[in-house]
Amino acid sequence: MKLNIALLAGDGIGPEVIAQAVKVCDAIAVKYNHEINWTSALTGACAIDDCGEPYPDSTHEVCLAADAVLFGAIGHPKYDNDPKAKIRPEQGLLKMRQKLGLFANVRPTFTFPSLIDNSPLKRERIEGTDLIILRELTGGIYFGERGRKDDGNTAFDTCTYTRFEIQRLAKMGFEIAMTRGKKLCCVDKANVLETSRLWRETVQDMEKDYPEVTVSYEFVDAVAMRLVQWPNSYDVLITENLFGDILTDEASVISGSMGLMPSASKGLHTSLYEPIHGSYPQATGKDIANPLATVLSAAMMFEDAFGLQAEADAIREVVNKSLAEGIVTEDLSGKNKAYGTNAVGDWLAKNI
């Protein structure tokens, strides 16, 4: 099978972790007789430095022509530390989501048996956790009207949602729930926000189309609390952009490291697969970044974009083996020997 994959390494540790995922994918291609055509393109701070745009048209064309996009991370301190910067790397991510129609971020959260005690949460609270958060990506406050009043002392950001935007994300949530535990939680703030009331009303109207799914409605603050108390009580959660951004990062600590969790962004055109961590500029070039989330994102890509279940399972199996045998970077090594980013990637590819 011929696989055309766009490779957007991005900034910071992005190129380092992406390189390890490429090693793993190439090993899978050899083992299962596939041909991968990698096409690299710029996005984020490196794209601003190169052409003044965080998501250039040339990069968009590469993404549109690909079967899937494997993405690293974006962000750079010189923009983070300048509140007056007019162009930011993160604008490229928002633009990419909008132009590719990536309206749904799919973030699984699960635990690894060999790392259960690495989590800051007690074993008995997190054992058995296996949930998915669907975050709406192209609406809400991140894309609403924003600005400052004439005096410069008042700023505003507007949160706007249409029924259609809610329906298409909820539909995906219901369909995923049907393949899992048949439980769906709609996360909102309907006691305060009008957009949340539209979310709740819309999902309630859709319940009749999925009679096998048990639907609950919870306020975002209650979910934030329950995620650290009883995360294994959840199956599939759907929510708006801002709430999803916060809750998915909170959920990531359940596994013990942000360097372990993959994600997918799906929508109208080419789907994108990426680790949930950021560009981690402090670790750039030190060969200490954990590549496993990126490698597991590649597993999601094989399964979801190409329907290649055996290949995805082989990647997950070798990642579990690396964790069990302690072939890990310093964030997971504890008092044991830590391996470099490149060494972990080489070990994974060799063992595939």
Image (cartoon, rainbow, N blue to C red):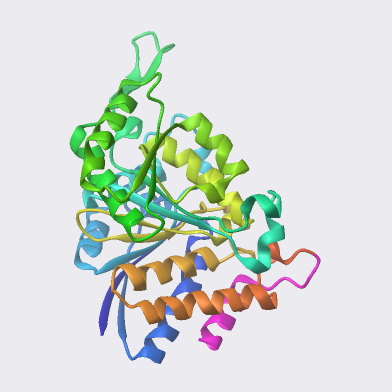
Is any part of residue 23 visible from this angle?
A: no
Out of 166 and 236, give the one closest to the viewer: 236
Q: Quadrant of residue 170?
A: top left
Q: Quadrant of residue 306?
A: bottom left
Q: Is 337 covered by the magenta stretch? A: yes
Name the residue at 44% across, 77% down: 313
Which quadrant does the N terminus fall into? bottom left
In the image, 83 versus 112, the foreground residue is: 112
- Seen at 67% across and 61% down, the residue is 116
Give the residue displayed 24% in from the left and 53% down from the top: 267
Q: Is residue 139 above or below residue 333?
A: above
- Does 215 lie within the magenta span? no
Total numbered circles: 0
Where residue 80 appears, as percent x and y from the top left, is 51, 39
Left or right of 189, for residue 12: right
* Extreme-front residue of the structure: 211
Q: Main secondary structure of the magenta part?
A: helix
Q: Quadrant of residue 160?
A: top left
Which of 113/62 is in front? 113
- Residue 174, compared with residue 152, is above or below; it is below
Name the outermost residue toward the top.
151
Looking at the picture, tell me which residue is in the foreground, 82 or 24: 24
Report x, y in % for residue 314.
46, 81
Q: Is residue 297 visible?
A: yes
Residue located at (41% from left, 55% from top): 46
Residue 38: image location, x then y, percent: 32, 75
Residue extent of the magenta highlight: 335-352
Residue 218 is situated, as x and y percent measured from the top left of the image, at 44, 33
